[in-house]
Amino acid sequence: MVKIDTFARLEPEHKVEARRQTNLSINGIDVELMKKLCRVLSQTPYKVIVSKGPAYDQYELPDNMWGKAFLPQTKILPMVDMVMTHGGNNTVTEAFMLGKPMLVMPMFGDQYDNAQRIAEKGYGLRINAHNCGETEMIECIEKSMNDKEIRDRCRKAAERIQSSNSKEKACIKIEQLVAKYAQS
């Protein structure tokens, strides 16, 4: 098994994280969709890091992919050039923080709204992975990865977020609210 740091340094230069929802019950895991994504991504020149989820033993990864059942996403995202995700809030906010373009494949809940806004605002693309053909999916991967406007928009968003001091501001506001209502 190739270690992630070694894998990340291998050519080609671009890497993609194919993120799969990992907190679904086993009944909710769409193994056939993961097999399709692996098949499609195997046709690209990219190295792909995959968080396989609880169904990790039900599908194999091609040679240009590396993954495990669960991976430390916050350690991986800085190493990748683009994120394929279902569009959950954690992955979306982490990708924004790091300026990573996204290819969003929503499955349920807030993911549809997140995917729509990401596409509308130009931070990536939204696709229906179930109905999307392989050629169309590869085109979307290429556009998400290589479109200069998308990449610039994501980089600028990350710069704004990282310079905003928002964590400290949020802590101050929370402390003010607690102090105000603790006296009541």
Image: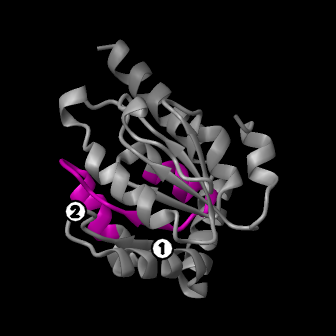
The residue at 47%/43% (across/down) is 60
Would you say residue 109 sits in the magenta stretch? Answer: yes
Where does residue 76 sit, x and y in percent of width and height?
A: 64, 44
The residue at 42%/61% (across/down) is 39
Where does residue 148 sit, x and y in percent of width and height?
A: 61, 86
Residue at which label 2 appears = 130
Instruction: Name the amino acid type tagged 2.
Output: His
Where does residue 49 sit, x and y in percent of width and height?
A: 59, 49
The residue at 38%/81% (across/down) is 135
Residue 167 is drawn in which quadrant? top right
In the figure, 136 relative to 124: above or below?
A: below
The residue at 53%/58% (across/down) is 96
The crowding category of the residue bearing disc 1, from other C-alpha atoms within 10 Å (few below 14, some 14 to 19, many at least 20), is many
Is residue 7 rendered to the left or right of residue 100?
A: right
Residue 87 seen:
no
Please state which of residues 165 and 59 is positioned toward the viewer in this rendering.
59
Where does residue 149 sit, x and y in percent of width and height?
A: 56, 86
Would you say residue 180 sits in the magenta stretch? Answer: no
Q: Earlier in the sequence, mark 1 or mark 2?
A: 2
Question: Which mark is drawn over residue 141?
Answer: 1
Identify the image quadrant of the N terminus.
top right
Q: Magenta segment range? A: 92-117
